[in-house]
Amino acid sequence: MKLADVANASGVHYSTVSRVLRPGSKGRISDDVAERVRSVARELGYQPNSVAASLRTQSTRSIGLIVHDMSDPVYPPILSGIEATLSPEGFAVLVSNTGYDIDVEIDIVNRMASRLVDGIFLATTRLHDPVVARCKELGIPLVSVLRQTEDATSSAVVNDCYGGMTDLTNHILGLGFRDIAVILAPQGLSTARERWLGIRDTLSQVGLSLPEHRVAHVDRMSAENGKQAAQRLLAAAPSRPEVIICVNDLVAVGAIQACRGAGLSVPSDISVSGYNDIPLVDIIDPPLTTVRMNLHDIGKEAGELMLEQFGAESDAPKTLRIASQLVLRASLRYNPAGKNRNARPGTLGPYTP
């Protein structure tokens, strides 16, 4: 079945059928004509020859999305947002997992390039990233999602992690907490660094700092690693902290498990907070206080930024920051034993020593 067959059956010119059935083709076609062509194409069982089209245009109408692990609940809402923007434009999104292996990541980029993807979304970006450099060498349009490079020389859509963690830390201080512990992610990631700086700077403004035994790190942001990090925090000092601020929700889930394993009740004995607001953290026991990243919006904006790159005369990079939202739930509670005894639950604002 060819375009010419659809044209003959529709009673319109070949070029009209081409503009209707080939995404991205230029030209104005009336709605009635377009619908007649599509209806005939469906009746005849027409399928476009994407291979031939790719050879003609050097475009496959496909875009890669590279992630560490698609089972991470952060990624599906981002993919959904990207597809909401790109699918109506005729693009398909191809997802690849790296397993946290940078060599695999570069190999994926090379293979995507050989298959003529029109662009790549990179959800694994590091502050100093050879994968970003490789995409530039290949001349592939690139949009980083969630994270960005130190020099911000490539386009990115990120969450305002600094502002989100500042709001959360201010709230925790306002509840009367002063003996605070944190679980941090590798500082070679912009998200991890901004969240740590949000905590550190907020505490510094009120004259507080964290001793070494109140800081733990995870190599990967998983529940198991969070559990192990929290166990280290609970064993590191004679007294337990009043609250554990976790770098993300999965780490927080692991921290809650560690607290329970130590015979502690959350939040009666110790409070825990997360970051991201991934699905289901509102129904765990206790529901998790966190910061919502608006992941679907990040994906949609990333899709728009990619489309802009296709039509741009300049390759000047652009960074978009999506606002965060503090989400208060039962894993964090007012601390009557804290120094700020005038604080009330829900208070936002600086801790008063």
Image (tube, rainbow, N blue to C red):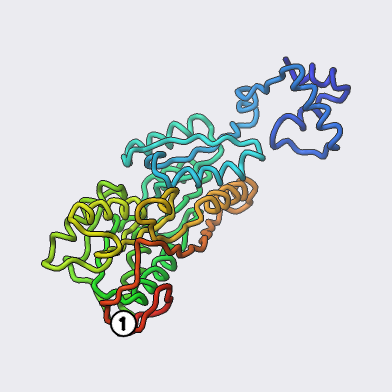
Look at 51% across and 55% down and name the residue there. Answer: 294
* Number of numbered tags placed on the structure image: 1
Q: Position of residue 60 (x, y in %)?
A: 59, 31
Q: Position of residue 252 (x, y in %)?
A: 32, 55
Q: Amino acid at mark 1?
A: Asn
Residue neighbourhood size for the residue with mark 1, other residues' Cα within 10 Å, grouped as few (<14), some (14–19), many (≥20) = some
Look at 25% across and 53% down and name the residue there. Answer: 218
Name the residue that disc number 1 marks. Answer: 340
Question: Is the residue 98 above or below the residue 345 in the image?
Answer: above
Question: Is the residue 2 above or below the residue 201 in the image?
Answer: above
Question: Is the residue 195 above or below the residue 54 in the image?
Answer: below
Q: Position of residue 155 (x, y in %)?
A: 51, 54
Look at 35% across and 84% down and name the residue there. Answer: 342
Mark 1 secondary-structure assignment: loop
Could you say which quadrant of the image residue 7 lies in?
top right
Could you say which quadrant of the image residue 24 lies in?
top right
